[in-house]
Image (tube, rainbow, N blue to C red):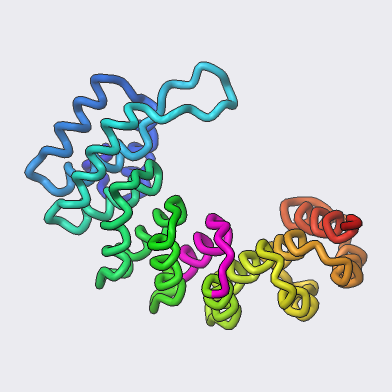
């Protein structure tokens, strides 16, 4: 099914099911797929390898990775494949199963002509650390493609904790982005670094139409100056609106800004 329904919802669901069925026999099958002459089979093998999990013994606990070393080796080899879709599968997998030997190739692929490849790289690089990973994310955060900018800004602002003037400059630049999600991720990233300029931004943005981004940023920056705006938001809600994730974020922001620091 995963191969017949390639790159469809049915195909991805089949791959997700395979992730949960890790076994020596399945690993042998994955290795055979990765050695196939068909690029679709090679890509499928890497997509399966990237998230193979040991079978859960206890309900609710996350399952550890299955055959980590072996699957990382397959993914690293996939970076050298001649077909771009196979390389994309390897890049995606090395975000799920990071390996230091992948970083140089990921940084090089950050300049790929295909925005889909750059998007995969932006997602993966959030799981890598060090100056060259940060530099690549900063470049991708100002990419021509908004989806690439979105993920790179999230990786730079939230997944990474590095706080330098250069990182803040990129995040501040992205506060003016045309894309709403990019702006939101930049705001959260600056708030996580307690950039004092965020308070004025939030005072201008905290209103009935604000998103979770603004509430998360308010919680992160935790400034008492935001309390009047946050309480005004809460007071303006109907009873039916006092539930759900957005309302939970509002409550968390009020609690954080109310704490004496």
As drawn, is 234 to the left or to the right of 198? right
Q: Is residue 150 magenta?
A: yes
On the rendered image, what quadrant is the C terminus found in? bottom right
As drawn, is 208 to the left or to the right of 135? right
Of helix, strand and loop, which mostly describes the magenta segment? helix
Name of the residue lying farthest toward the top: 57
In the rendered image, residue 131, in percent from the top left (x then y), is placed at: 43, 62
Q: Quadrant of residue 157?
A: bottom right
Q: Can residue 241 be spotted in the picture?
A: no
On the rendered image, what quadrant is the N terminus found in? top left
Q: Name the residue: 53% across, 70% down.
A: 167
| Vertical position of residue 96 compared to residue 82: above or below | above
Range of residues picked out in magenta:
149-165
| Vertical position of residue 21 compared to residue 10: above or below | above
Q: Nearer the viewer, residue 214 or 127?
A: 127
Q: Name the residue: 7% across, 43% down.
A: 37
Q: Nearer the viewer, residue 201 or 1?
A: 201
| Vertical position of residue 38 compared to residue 252: above or below | above
In the rendered image, residue 249, in percent from the top left (x then y), is placed at: 76, 56
Q: Nearer the viewer, residue 64 or 146?
A: 64
Name of the residue lying farthest toward the left: 37
């Amino acid at each position: 099914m995963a191969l017949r329904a390639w790159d469809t919802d049915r195909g991805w669901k089949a791959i997700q099911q395979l992730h949960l069925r890790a076994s020596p026999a399945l690993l042998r099958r994955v290795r055979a797929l990765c050695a196939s002459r068909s690029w679709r089979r090679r890509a499928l093998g890497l997509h399966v390898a990237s998230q193979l999990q040991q079978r859960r013994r206890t309900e609710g606990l996350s399952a550890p990775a299955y055959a980590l070393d072996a699957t990382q080796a397959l993914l690293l080899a996939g970076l050298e494949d001649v077909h771009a879709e196979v390389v994309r599968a390897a890049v995606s997998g090395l975000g799920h199963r990071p390996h230091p030997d992948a970083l140089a190739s990921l940084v090089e692929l950050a300049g790929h002509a295909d925005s889909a490849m750059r998007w995969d790289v932006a997602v993966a690089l959030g799981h890598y650390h060090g100056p060259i990973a940060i530099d690549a994310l900063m470049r991708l955060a100002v990419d021509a493609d908004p989806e690439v900018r979105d993920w790179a800004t999230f990786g730079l602002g939230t997944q990474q904790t590095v706080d330098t003037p250069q990182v803040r400059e990129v995040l501040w630049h992205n506060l003016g982005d045309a894309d709403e999600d990019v702006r939101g991720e930049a705001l959260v990233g600056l708030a996580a670094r307690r950039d004092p300029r965020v308070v004025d931004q939030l005072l201008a943005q905290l209103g009935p139409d604000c998103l979770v981004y603004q509430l998360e940023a308010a919680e992160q920056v935790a400034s008492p100056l935001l309390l009047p705006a946050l309480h005004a938001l809460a007071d303006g809600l109907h009873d039916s609106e006092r539930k759900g994730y957005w309302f939970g974020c509002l409550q968390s922001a009020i609690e954080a800004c109310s704490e004496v620091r």
